[in-house]
Every structure is written in structure tokens, then in C-alpha cells.
Image (cartoon, helix red, strand yellow):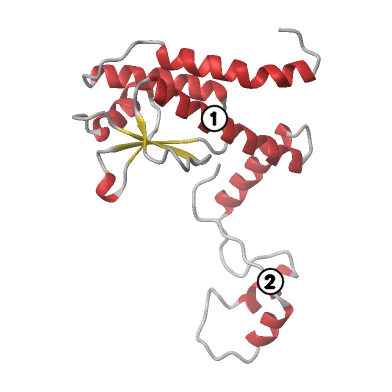
């Protein structure tokens, strides 16, 4: 849920000892400097403070998803991504669209093949300009052929419904024969079916 650029590094005691004898040139990756600064509550070089702050906010959100429990929040976040991905596949199928990887789908992103004769670049542009929403184009040789919808992070069922409705609109404007409401209805029905059991277990009446 943060911009790219933040990485983590774990260093064993054996690696610390090897650093003392290694002759390889290094500057930013001289972890001895960083270790020394850390003992004083400082960093050896200018840190990516915005990314660190962003990570803090993301972890707070995850902890809230777990009612204060970070581990439970992580599970809730993953469960949400898995459900959102499944519902996105339902929406695409309801619109007669093909999935790029139907036999090995991902819970992180769903790649949808654009209808024949329609450039996915135009669909991506329409999504952004009309709805302020971001879906990704294909990359490399697949550019213009795919729509990629991400499900990780701050994303849930209502986002899937909005994305499905937006997809119907941009497809229709691009010349595809779309039955408005078909994908949204399919998503709602699938969501109701998947959550019915959980509601019964929780003692919630339909």
C-alpha cells in the first residue's frame, strides 16, 4: 500500500564478521556505518522518510482490520484480496471476457484480455479520464491487449463493484456489446453466496 522503493535487509553475525575483512569497495552498502549510527538512534545516510511514514500508516490500517491484532489484520487483508480477485474474475466472465491466466489466477492482480478489435490502451485511458480510476495496461508484447486490475492493499468488495460498473461503461463506449448491470449483478450474487455461510456462523439472520 506504499510506493515502491522500501527494502529490508537481514544480516547474520557471520556476515558482520566478514565485513571486517572484505575488500570490496562500498559506500552506501557499508552496513557497518549504518549499524554504528543505529546505536545512536540515527541513520548513516538520508532515509526515505516518506516511505517509512507510509509503511507506518499501512501497518496501522492492517492492525485496524484485525481489531488491533496485526497478524489477524494481515489475514483479513489477504482474505480480502483473494475474494476481490475471485469476484473480479466473476465480473469478467459475466461480460464474456477471457482471463489471461484462467487455470492459475493470482490474488494480487487479474489480467483480462481485451475484446477482439479493442485496444486496451483506450480502455485504460477512459477509466482514468472518466472515473479517475487506475487499471493497468499490458506490458511489452501484451500492451494494448490486456487490462490488469490489482486487488492488494486498500481494496475491497465495494471497489470490485465500482470497477465492474466502470468496465461496463468503458467497454460500451469502445463499441463492445454490453448488457449494463450484468457483471455487477454477478458480483453481488457471488458475494452474497460466499458470505452467507460466514453470516450464519456469526448468528446473523439474512
Q: Is residue 60 visible?
A: no
Q: Which residue is mark 2?
A: 37
Q: Nearer the viewer, residue 104 or 30?
A: 104
Q: Is residue 166 visible?
A: yes
Q: Is residue 79 left or right of residue 114?
A: right
The N terminus sits in image quarter? top right
Q: Secondary structure at mark 2?
A: helix
Looking at the picture, how far across and down is residue 33, in whole percent? 64, 77
The residue positioned 47% from the left and 28% from the top of the image is 88
- Judge whether 20 appears above or below 34 on screen: below
The residue positioned 75% from the left and 34% from the top of the image is 66
Looking at the picture, how far across and down is residue 190, in whole percent? 55, 19
Front of the two marks 1 and 2: 1
Tag 2: Cα neighbours inside 10 Å, few (<14), some, or many (≥20)?
Answer: some
Alpha carbon distance from label 1 to label 2: 43 Å
As drawn, which residue projects farthest toward the top? 206
Looking at the picture, how far across and down is residue 81, in whole percent? 57, 35
Mark 1 and mark 2 lie on one chain; the one further toward the N terminus is 2
The residue positioned 51% from the left and 24% from the top of the image is 159
Label 1–label 2 contact, CB within 8 A: no
Q: Is residue 94 left or right of residue 48?
A: left
Circle number at residue 84: 1
Amino acid at each position: 500500500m506504499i510506493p515502491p522503493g522500501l527494502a529490508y535487509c537481514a544480516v547474520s553475525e557471520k556476515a558482520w564478521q566478514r565485513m571486517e575483512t572484505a575488500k570490496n569497495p562500498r559506500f552506501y552498502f557499508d552496513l557497518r556505518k549504518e549499524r554504528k549510527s543505529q546505536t545512536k538512534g540515527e541513520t548513516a545516510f538520508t532515509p526515505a522518510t516518506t516511505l517509512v511514514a507510509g509503511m507506518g500508516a499501512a501497518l496501522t490500517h492492517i492492525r485496524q482490520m484485525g481489531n488491533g491484532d496485526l497478524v489477524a489484520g494481515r489475514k483479513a487483508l489477504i482474505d480480502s484480496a483473494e475474494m476481490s480477485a475471485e469476484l473480479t474474475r466473476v465480473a469478467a466472465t459475466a461480460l464474456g471476457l477471457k482471463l489471461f491466466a484462467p487455470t492459475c489466477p493470482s490474488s494480487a492482480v487479474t489480467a483480462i484480455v481485451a475484446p477482439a478489435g479493442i485496444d486496451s490502451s483506450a480502455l485504460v485511458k477512459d477509466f482514468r479520464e472518466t472515473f479517475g480510476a487506475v487499471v493497468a495496461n499490458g506490458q511489452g508484447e501484451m500492451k494494448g491487449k490486456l487490462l490488469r486490475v490489482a486487488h492488494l492493499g486498500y481494496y475491497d468488495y465495494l471497489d470490485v463493484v465500482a470497477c465492474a460498473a466502470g468496465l461496463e461503461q468503458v467497454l460500451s463506449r469502445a463499441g463492445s456489446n454490453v448488457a449494463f448491470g450484468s457483471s455487477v449483478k454477478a458480483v453481488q450474487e457471488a458475494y452474497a453466496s460466499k458470505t452467507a455461510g460466514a453470516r450464519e456462523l456469526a448468528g446473523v439472520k439474512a
